[in-house]
Image (tube, rainbow, N blue to C red):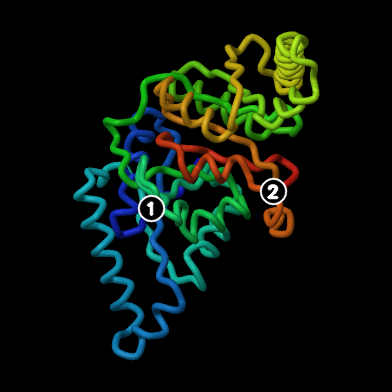
Amino acid sequence: MDWLVGMDLSDKGQGALGYARWLEEALPESERFVGVHVLEEAELRQLLRYHHLAELEQKAADAAERVVEELGATQVLAERRVICGRSAEQALIDLGHQGDVRALVIGRQARRGEKRVVRLGRVARRLLRTLPSPVVVVPPDLRPEGVGDGPVLFAASIDVDASGAADFARSIAKQLGRPLAVVHVIPGDDYLAAELVPSGAAGTFFQELREDHERNLLAWMRTHELSGVPYHLAEGSVVDRLAELARSERSPLVVCGSRGLGLGMRLFSSSVASDLAAVSEVPVAVVPNSEARH
């Protein structure tokens, strides 16, 4: 299976290439990594006034080769492609729909711990909205030696069917030789109901709330063939707690299913997977459900 690695020639793409290098060393030889750099139509429209297309493609290929060599990834990428497309995200979406693609590995704008308005960037945001295949978002400053040595974490939203994400999480954990652990966060909103509970009954309310979530989580895990997998039950802001657990557990990868929100829904409801991919210090794989991909 092919892992497509977005080759952003700026420093924002170094994390994706570095993580691909780590994956290539950790995964079986049957997994193949292909670097892709897209020459966008808007950029070409200007440059073609002064250069032939073949010349521009060669310049981009040479620049990509220098970046790959500087990051020590020359032996990692079995193939390097420079392609033309209306936009980088559309070209990657088209490639991602091919049946032999295991996942897309891309960078994001924000470094780990960096506070900025734009965290994902245009390409990552669009790919996470479309999800032609699993998309792995990597912080730009992550280096291979900085990848965690802990378990692969599977973020569970117990009101969503995430069979595709469960399959991906089990498979990648096995291939990496890492244990798998499930994480479920009880949203902080659930605790707002405590304000309506008499003060003397608050302790019982919180205990019953946690027990309800744990019972539902175990049922959800059975449905997704995850019985017996260790699990963490946490409370609070879902994105913040997932990011904290990924960091403290030294996870090499957090796997999330997608709620499949359309653009209209996103005006009212944020996607936990996209928000986590924007802030996590650990790479995040967002996996479409089987129905969405087909």
- Does 151 sit left or right of 93 as displayed? left
Q: Is 43 or 21 nearer to us in this picture?
A: 43
The numbered mark, 1 or 2, whose residue comes first in the sequence reads 1
Position of 208 relative to 16 (above/below): above
* 100 sits left or right of 147 in the view: right
Mark 1 lies on residue: 35
**Vertical placement of 169 versus 4: above or below?**
above
At x 42%, y 84%, the residue is 45
* Residue furthest out toward the bottom: 49
Q: Quadrant of residue 160?
A: top right
Of tags 1 and 2, which is closer to the observer?
2
Label 2 sits on a secondary structure element that is loop
Tell me where residue 154 sits by quadrant. Answer: top right
Instruction: Quote the CA–CA distance across marks 1 and 2.
Output: 34 Å
Asked if residue 215 can be seen in this view, the reply is no
Q: Report if the CB atoms under discs 1 and 2 are less than 8 Å apart.
A: no
Please state which of residues 210 and 111 is positioned toward the viewer in this rendering.
Answer: 210
**Residue occupying the point 34% across, 83% down:** 47
Is the residue marked by circle 1 packed among few (<14), some (14-19), or many (20+) residues within 10 Å? many
Residue pushed farthest front?
199
Q: Which residue carries the number 2 mark?
A: 269
Instruction: Note whether 190 is above or below 31 in the view shown.
Output: above
The amino acid on which the numbered mark 2 sits, given as a three-letter code, is: Ser
Q: Which amino acid lies under the numbered mark 1 shown in the image of this protein?
A: Gly
Residue 90: x %, y % from top left = 55, 64
Estimate the x, y position of residue 211 in percent, counting from the top left: 73, 11
Q: Position of residue 131 (x, y in %)?
A: 61, 50
Q: Residue at x 69, y 48 (%)?
A: 269
Please indicate, yes or no, whether residue 266 appears anywhere in the rendered image: yes
